[in-house]
Image (cartoon, rainbow, N blue to C red):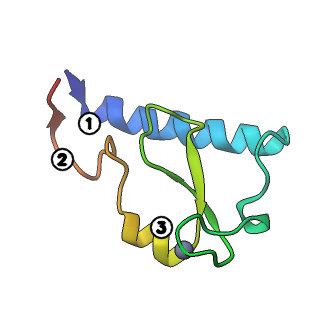
Amino acid sequence: MQTIEHLRAAVQVAHTAVARARRHGLLPSPSSLVCVDCGRPALFYDHREYAKPLDVEPVCRSCNVRRGPAIDSPVRRSTKVEG
Ligand SMILES: [Zn+2]
């Protein structure tokens, strides 16, 4: 069973992985890309699943909000995750 602490740790790992990849030039700055949803300038990399730390897509602010939290975000489940 995954606890909220595990989920929070996964978020941390995912954000660290993206920051490291950007530092090493493996991912460009999202501001150099366009939003995959609407084509406007992107601002963030969006995680759909923190269990896949580098599986990210560039999105703008409004699409990032519209997408909502990742499927395994601790924001979605306040106490625990089944499975
Ligand atoms: Zn957008």
Q: Nearer the viewer, mark 3 or mark 1?
A: 3
How packed mark 2 is, by other alpha carbons closer than 10 Å (few <14, some 14-19, many 20 or more), is: few
Q: Farthest right residue? A: 25
- Sequence-earlier tag: 2 or 1: 1
Q: In this figure, which residue is indicated by the disc labeled 3?
A: 64
Vertical position of residue 28 compared to residue 63: above or below: above
Residue 72 in picture, x, y percent from top left: 32, 40
Q: In this figure, which residue is indicated by the disc labeled 1?
A: 4
Q: Secondary structure at mark 3?
A: helix
- Sequence-earlier tag: 3 or 2: 3
Q: Residue at x 17, y 23 (%)?
A: 83
Q: Quadrant of ligand 1?
A: bottom right
- Sequence-earlier tag: 3 or 1: 1
**The residue carrying mark 3 has its beta carbon less than 8 Å from ligand 1:** yes
Q: In this figure, which residue is indicated by the disc labeled 2?
A: 78
Q: Nearer the viewer, mark 3 or mark 2?
A: 3
Q: Amino acid at mark 1?
A: Ile
Q: Quadrant of the N terminus?
A: top left
